[in-house]
Every structure is written in C-alpha cells, then in structure tokens.
Amino acid sequence: MAVATGNITPPCIETYLTDVNRLFEQELRSVLPHVQQLISHVGKFRGKMLRPSLVLLSGLAVQNKPAESAQLGRTHIVLAAVVEMVHVATLVHDDVLDSAEIRRRGATINHLHGNEAAVLLGDLLISHAFHLCSSLESQSASRLIGHTTNIVCEGELTQNHNRGNWKLDEETYLDIIYRKTASLIETSCRLGAAGTNQDKRQIDALALYGRHVGMAFQIIDDVLDIAGTQKTVGKSLGTDIDKGKLTLPMIHFLSTAAPTHRELLMSLLESSEADRVEHVRQLLIPSASMNYARRRAGQMVEDAVAALAVLPESQAKQILIDMARFITVRQS
Amino acid sequence: MAVATGNITPPCIETYLTDVNRLFEQELRSVLPHVQQLISHVGKFRGKMLRPSLVLLSGLAVQNKPAESAQLGRTHIVLAAVVEMVHVATLVHDDVLDSAEIRRRGATINHLHGNEAAVLLGDLLISHAFHLCSSLESQSASRLIGHTTNIVCEGELTQNHNRGNWKLDEETYLDIIYRKTASLIETSCRLGAAGTNQDKRQIDALALYGRHVGMAFQIIDDVLDIAGTQKTVGKSLGTDIDKGKLTLPMIHFLSTAAPTHRELLMSLLESSEADRVEHVRQLLIPSASMNYARRRAGQMVEDAVAALAVLPESQAKQILIDMARFITVRQS
C-alpha cells in the first residue's frame, strides 16, 4: 500500500490503514456473486489511500500526545473508510464520463462491464459510504460528508458544463478543482481532527491544509494528464484534452503564448483528427505553461505547510508536511 | 399534483405535500445557474408523489387520533422529501441506463443534456438526499435510507446483469423488483410510521403494506411498458424489451405459451430488426400472460390491504387502502 508520501506507509498509521481496508471490504461485501465480482475489481483501484491517511494523520496530529501514546478509535476508522468509498465512487463515475479504459494499470469498470454497470457500481459505493457513515453515533460527520458530496457533484457538473469552453479562466478552473477534488480532502482532514478534539483553531488549520493540498494535488494531476506517460501514471491520459476540458497549463498557454501558438492550440483542440491529443501534448510539454502550473501547485503546498504552524510538533505533523511536499514531485 | 389515488391529492396531506415540495426545492437550490437549470428540469419529473404521500399517510395512520387532530412535524416533511429525492435520482440514472428519451411527457435529462450531465445530476440528487436526511436529530433514518439504497443499487445491478438472460425465472424477477422498487416504498412506510410512534406491530404492518404495494406497482409498471401507449403513460415505453430485460408477462409467456409462440418471442428478443419491439408487443398484448401479471399484482394489493388490519380505522388508513387498489387500474 502506497500513501502519498511515496511508496512507504508511515508506521504510525499502518495498523489503522489495515483496519480501514478490512472495514471497507466488510461494508461492501455482497451475497450476490455478480455484485461481489464488481466490488472485488474496485479493490484494485485503490492505491494511494491519500484521503484515509489524512483522516488518520489529522486525528493524530491534534492529540497533543507523544507518538507512542497517541491512539485512534473506531470513529476514525469509519471516517477513513467513508472518505475512501466516496473517492472510489467518484473515480468509477469519472471513468464513465471520461470513457477511460485504464485505471491503476487495470481495465476500468466501464471498459470491462459497460457503462451501465459502472454507473450503478458508483451509486452502490456512494450509498454504502452514507450507510457506513450513519453507523456513527453523531449525525455531524454524515451532514458534512453530504455537504461535501453536494459540492463535489456541483464541481463535476461545472467542469462538464465548461467542456469545449476555450475561454475558461483560471478563477473558474480553481473553483472547479476546489469543488471536485480539494473539498473532499479538506473534509477528510477536518473530520479526522474533529474526531479527536474540538479545538476549533486546530481543526480549521487542518482543513486549510487539506484544501491547499487538494488544490495542489489536482493541478499536478492535470499536469500529469498532459506530461505523464501511461506506464508511469497507470491510467488513461490525455483525457482532459480529448474531452475538451481546459486545465491550468492550457488556460495559461491560451492567455500567454505567442498568437500563432495560441491559434494552433485552439485549432488542435477543436479538430477531430485522431492524433490531436498527441499534438497538443507536444505543443504544451516544452512550454512555460507547464512550469507555471507546477509553480502554482508548489505555492499551494507551501500554504498548506504554513497552515500547520499552529499545531504542536509531532510525528504525524511531520508526515503531513512530507506528504504535501511529495505532491509536487510525484510522477503518478 | 397527482398522488397515486388518481388525480386528486387527499386533503389531509395536501398542506404537508406543499411543505415537502418547498423543502425539496430549497434543499436542491444552487447558486450555479447551469446546475439550477438541470434541477429545475428535474422538478418536471415529479408527478405521483407516491413515496412522500406514503411517508405522510403512514405517519398519520399510526397516530390513533381523529383526523382533525392528527398532526405531523418537520421530521415527516424531511423524510418525505428525502425519499422523493432518492426516487428522482434513480429515475435520472434509470433513464441513462435505458437510453430513454421521454419522462413525464418531457425530454429526459440524458436526452437534453447528455449522459454525463445525467449521471452527475443523479449523483447530486442522491447526495442531497443524504445531506437532508442527516439534518434530522437521530441517525436511524439515515441508516435505514442508506441500507435501502444499498438494496436498490443491488437490484439494479442484478437487473443489468440479467439483461439478455431469457431463462430468468419468476423468483429472480420478484427479487429484482423487490430490491429496485418495493424496498424504497417499504422504507417510506416504515419511516413514516416510526416517525410517529414506536409500536413495532403497527410499524411492521405498514412496512409490509409498502412492500406489497411496491411489488404490485412495479409489476403494473412492467405491464404498461408493454401494453401502454406513450401518450397515456408519458414516458418512453418498450425499453424492457429493447434492453433485453425480461418482466413478468414475458417470463410467464416463455414458460407457458405454445412452443411456436415461445420460439417466436425468443427470436424477436434476439433479433436486431428495427420494429422488433412492436412485434413483441403485438405478440404479448393479446396473450394470457398479461392477465397473469395483472392478477399477480392484484393479489399483492390485497395482501397489502390485509396487512393494514392491525391499524385502527382512520381516514389515512382508508386512503392507503384506496391507493393500493388504484395501482391495478392505473394507466400511467
């Protein structure tokens, strides 16, 4: 299991992540063999465990206890499994929307079992996420998860609405990625912290950290969709270009590149030739716009780290800092 | 507004249904114009208000008070809006899966705005349903709604898995329609009753009523998909035949009709000719299998009515009986 710090799971959350995985599988287990088959396939999608790790580390980072005595209970395990389930549901539906064929080096559900099964499986995952969340004593987490998924769906709808809009500006792009990606990461940190104590200053600090981390994470995802290789990233790439979704490098390019280059990008985006995605990549990869996007992500990572200043020093805090900084150098 | 008793809303729940509609719209309101546009279109899908009516009437039927003093509070309004939102979400996704173009005499979301927007809008509706449900004080309704949507999704997945399975038997068909339709109607009745008092016998009676009503309702829906006219029913018809989903009349026909007729149905179901749906309808409509299905639905309606015997006499109880009996004669 590889959390977002690289390929090593931080030992302080390793046991908890095992519990999260067990609960994830237990919640989804079905007596219907054809349903269980789909669910088992979904298990292969899970790699980074970024969101559950953030729930757990946020829970530990506000305990104000030495690492060896810090402890988390069932609430955190449930919350971590819930945010992962919500995340996987969005991946399954995203792959339908993107007509993606590859995810985590394997075939997507839509590619293997058709769009119908993928839509329904995404629905099943989101349903189980809420079912599991409502096993907690208080409604507050369910309410926040519901609020967050409202925002995620609105972000996805806004992105879909702006497909083929070559005038999309940076502000709208940032609003879209906040909604579709950063909001759930922000909520993961907030829930993790609030599951431990009620120190509003610490909870808000972790939520702000999560918000910035989520924004940076999505910008790098969008950079990799252009500059990565399918072998390294492990999923279908170039889908943003293919589906007419402008991302930060493209938005920057369209507003700063030489007029002939801008026109070339526009005509490639609008063309229907088979290799237009490859042409767009060749145009963008050597441009300053890729570095611009990476730099913006880097700034957000430093904002995330700065938000943690109010927390006491701890092993969990240090891991959160390392995870944030790893985002900008990640290749997958 | 036309509840399932026909075209007249029972006066004892009229004001409550207005409150349900107001809450439904308020919960879904979006500051994003393109999202609000989709949501407004969804408003047009809502007609029968069967599930919210059942929440309200179940709540009234267990009050053991004269009609004029019976009262419901915010809990019932919230629950009624939640089950309606879940139901509308399933309609939106169903229309994607069925490639349906018409719903309640208007264009479907997928037909107007594409499959992507329809998938995301369904997600938004289910998300808001859970968000709204978690505004209640207790988690118990959220937990039951989550459990129910798990079952609904499994039913839809089972139906999808059995597309083109010409050996589908009646037992599996009944399991599918329990899951995809009756479970939410059962839950609507259970939540409505449990929102009023904790008399287990009365709550279980209403849940059983809802289960039978839901089964009968879906069988008649499947009959109308074959025998109805789009003008009367108001939605795309023949989709079960078109998508290879066997329903009760077809299952009965395949196991009882003369061998030549059975072979004809099989070959039509498997053919790719454009007017095969019409041919299948012409074969089934005059057959005894349509009456068999109607008769099975009629038995279930009487089982539903019988389940209410434990309840005290009341106006709400009488309306529940009338609603159940209306199912078998409905044309839309």
Image (cartoon, coloured by chain):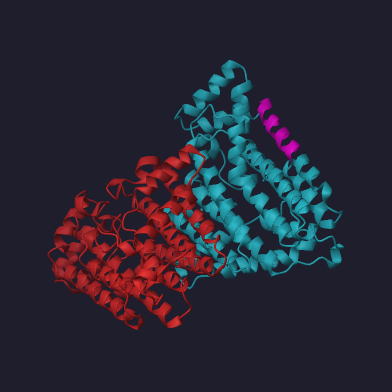
Chain colours: A cyan, B red
- Quadrant of residue B318 in the image? bottom left
In magenta segment, residue A297 = yes
In magenta segment, residue B143 = no
Residue B77, image x, y percentages:
45, 61
Asked if residue B311 shows in the view, the reply is: yes
Residue that appears at 39% across and 66% down: B56
- Front position in the image: A77 or A262: A77
For the record, the magenta segment spans A287-300
* Main SS class of the magenta portion in the image: helix
Residue A303, image x, y percentages:
76, 40
**Depicted A41 relative to depicted A29: above or below:** above
Total marks in image? 0
**Depicted A61 relative to depicted A179: above or below:** below
- Quadrant of residue B89 in the image? bottom left
Q: Residue furthest front?
A: B68
Residue B276, image x, y percentages:
20, 54
Asked if residue A49 shows in the view, the reply is: no
- Front position in the image: A286 or A88: A88
Residue that appears at 17% across and 63% down: B284
Q: Residue furthest top?
A: A259
Residue A42, image x, y percentages:
55, 59
- Quadrant holding the N terminus of chain B: bottom left
